[in-house]
Image (cartoon, rainbow, N blue to C red):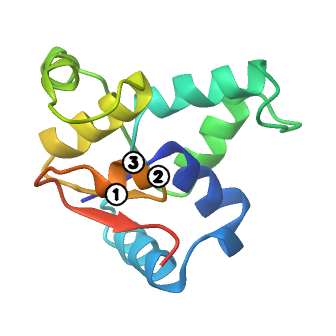
Amino acid sequence: MIVLDTHVALWSVFNTAALGKRCLRLIRQAESKRELAISAVSFWEISLLIAKRTLCFSDSATEVRRTILATGTAELPLSGEIAILAGEIEGLHGDPADRFIAATAIAHDATLVTADDRLLRWQHSVRRSNAES
């Protein structure tokens, strides 16, 4: 299973040119196997970014969510187990969204696809793939 970081989910739907060729291939393979997922927390993050006008979409967060899920991407809910894991993760910076997304990937034994250098450099056994490669 592949868990997309928030920005990667947006790129995969709205700006595939931002993705590296290897990453785009990985995402398309996961889509075909129905093994592509996004944390529900990413939709919270998207709604905050739209509200702050950091993301300029003509669509609402609800429409962006529908568009992402329409690709066959599964939405993984935030569970109590994931919430606790996010709080207990060692060595990761304090960004709550990143902590929840990383914990979701860990809990589902998935590969986290991100371009976030802090997540890519983080010393942890969770599998990661650089979205820009």
Position of 18 compared to 119: left or right? right
Q: How many numbered tags mark residues here?
A: 3
Position of 109 compared to 131: left or right? left
Q: What element carries label 3?
A: helix
Task: Identify the residue shown where x is 16% and y is 29%.
Answer: 89
The percent position of residue 9, horizontal first and vertical second, equals 54, 52
Task: Identify the residue shown where x is 65% and y is 46%.
Answer: 67
Task: Identify the residue shown where x is 14% and y is 31%.
Answer: 90
Q: Which residue lies furthest to the right in this view?
A: 58
Q: Label 2: few (<14), some or many (≥20) within 10 Å? A: some
Figure quadrant of residue 23: bottom left
Amino acid at pointer 3? Arg
Q: Quadrant of the N terminus?
A: bottom left
Amino acid at pointer 2? Asp
Q: In this view, does 95 lie above or below 27?
A: above
Position of 108 compared to 65: left or right? left
Disc 3 + disc 2, Cβ < 8 Å: yes
Disc 1 + disc 2, Cβ < 8 Å: yes
User: Could you tell me how far apart the alpha carbons at marks 3 and 2 are, in whole angstroms?
Assistant: 5 Å
Task: Give the labeled residue for mark 1.
Answer: 120
Q: In this view, does 75 lie above or below 96?
A: below
The percent position of residue 49, horizontal first and vertical second, equals 69, 27
User: Could you tell me how far apart the alpha carbons at marks 1 and 2 are, in whole angstroms?
Assistant: 6 Å
Task: Give the labeled residue for mark 2.
Answer: 116
Amino acid at pointer 1? Leu
The percent position of residue 77, horizontal first and vertical second, equals 32, 27
Task: Give the labeled residue for mark 3.
Answer: 118
Q: What element carries label 1?
A: helix
User: Could you tell me how far apart the alpha carbons at marks 1 and 3 are, in whole angstroms?
Assistant: 6 Å
Q: What element carries label 2?
A: loop
Q: Is residue 133 above or below residue 124?
A: below
Disc 1 + disc 3, Cβ < 8 Å: yes
